[in-house]
């Protein structure tokens, strides 16, 4: 670009020189010579003429021939040098190693077994929301409806293009309190569907639903039929948290043609790093055995701290983290995948 600027400066210098020289000549000659420069400089940009055409240029408004100015070849060369064209061409640059190679190294091997992680029980406090949203975006979030930070969590998760689902509170055999938006066995079809729709509509951008607790309700066929009818009408998937060995939720979802899957591992029934690490190791082993595995965790400080450091180097474990939606299917898991699942609320 410096060479181009130098040449442009030279053109203007030459023009100034011509002007000074013209002041010393006769006025008629000054006019003829000055007017001759414009066509000579700019006409060279026009398409090449036939070789048989006369070499003289002519004024547009007369038939009078223009004698070539003695500086014309110099000025034309400066104005239309082939070097300018070469310099204007984009440079073919090789990206630096930290851009070209790093991206390739970070791309996960798609042949590796898959793991997915779902964080439950979000919505009651800001700390849980903040720490969960700081995890890799392939980690899905399940939000309790009508809780203080439910809407904010769902909104920010949607902005991150993260899979977000409703964590629907369902009645359990231990009679633990469900909080707002709970679904109970005693509810009629109309009552249950109305409550579930209210829960769904309270959270923007959700793609599916899973059960919060629910060891009692997920074992009730009628209740699960009503749940799946609502989800089918909203094109939502269902994840069975599998809090009961008697759950019919996944089976019913398949019968209604909903994309579904079920939990393989709870990460943090014991809130200690050593225990969480043991469960994560189990998750990896299941993924390698069955090709994929789903873990559910909670926004405990211990769990968040563990996942934050563990998920950045999964390739050494020989697995890859995928979005929850990559686990969905419309048929039951294999028997091997369903064996020895630990059931807990």
Image: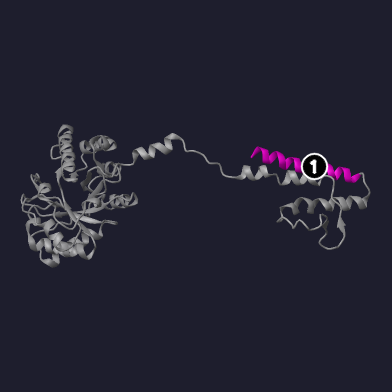
**Residue sitting nearer the eye, 301 or 240:** 240
**Residue sitting nearer the eye, 260 or 200:** 260
Query: Can you name the residue that lies furthest to the bottom here?
Result: 190
> Which residue lies at the image location 10% right of the left edge and 47% below the top edge?
336
Residue 229, given in percent of the width and then of the height, sits at: 17, 65
| Residue stretch rendered in magenta on the structure | 1-23
Q: How is the image coloured?
A: one colour
Query: Can you name the residue that lies furthest to the top here?
Result: 274
Quadrant of the rendering where the N terminus is positioned: top right
Q: Could you tell whether 131 is left or right of 334 in the image?
A: right
SS class of the residue under badge 1? helix
On screen, residue 81 above or below 217: above
Count all numbered tags in the image, as a single digit: 1
Q: Which residue is mark 1?
A: 14
**Is residue 7 magenta-colored?**
yes
On screen, residue 160 above or below 186: above
């Amino acid at each position: 670009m410096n060479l181009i600027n130098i040449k442009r400066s030279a053109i203007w210098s030459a023009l100034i020189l011509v002007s000074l020289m013209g002041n010393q000549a006769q006025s008629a000659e000054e006019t003829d010579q000055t007017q001759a420069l414009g066509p000579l400089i700019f006409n060279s940009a026009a398409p090449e003429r036939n070789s048989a055409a006369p070499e003289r240029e002519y004024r547009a408004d007369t038939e009078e021939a223009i004698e070539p100015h003695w500086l014309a070849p110099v000025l034309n060369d400066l104005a239309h040098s082939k070097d300018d064209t070469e310099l204007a061409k984009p440079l073919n640059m090789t990206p630096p190693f930290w851009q070209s190679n790093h991206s390739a190294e970070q791309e996960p091997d798609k042949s590796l077994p898959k793991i997915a992680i779902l964080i439950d029980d979000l919505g009651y406090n800001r700390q849980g929301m903040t720490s969960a949203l700081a995890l890799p975006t392939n980690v899905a979030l399940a939000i309790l409806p009508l809780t203080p930070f439910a809407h904010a969590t769902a909104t920010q998760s949607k902005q991150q293009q993260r899979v977000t689902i409703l964590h629907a509170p369902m009645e359990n055999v231990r009679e633990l309190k469900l909080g707002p938006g709970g679904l109970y066995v005693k509810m009629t079809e109309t009552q249950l569907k109305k409550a579930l729709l209210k829960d769904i509509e309270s959270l923007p951008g959700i793609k599916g639903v899973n059960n919060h607790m629910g060891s009692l309700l997920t074992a009730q066929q009628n209740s699960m039929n009503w749940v799946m009818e609502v989800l089918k009408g909203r094109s939502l998937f269902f994840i069975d948290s599998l809090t009961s060995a008697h759950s019919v939720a996944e089976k019913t979802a398949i019968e209604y043609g909903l994309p579904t899957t079920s939990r393989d591992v709870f990460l943090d029934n014991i809130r200690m790093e050593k225990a969480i690490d043991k469960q994560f190791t189990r998750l990896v082993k299941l993924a390698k055995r069955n090709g994929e595995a789903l873990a559910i965790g909670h926004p405990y400080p211990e769990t968040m701290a563990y996942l934050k450091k563990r998920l950045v180097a999964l390739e050494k474990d020989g697995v890859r983290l995928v979005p929850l939606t990559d686990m969905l299917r419309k048929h039951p898991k294999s028997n091997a995948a369903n064996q020895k699942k630990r059931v807990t609320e």
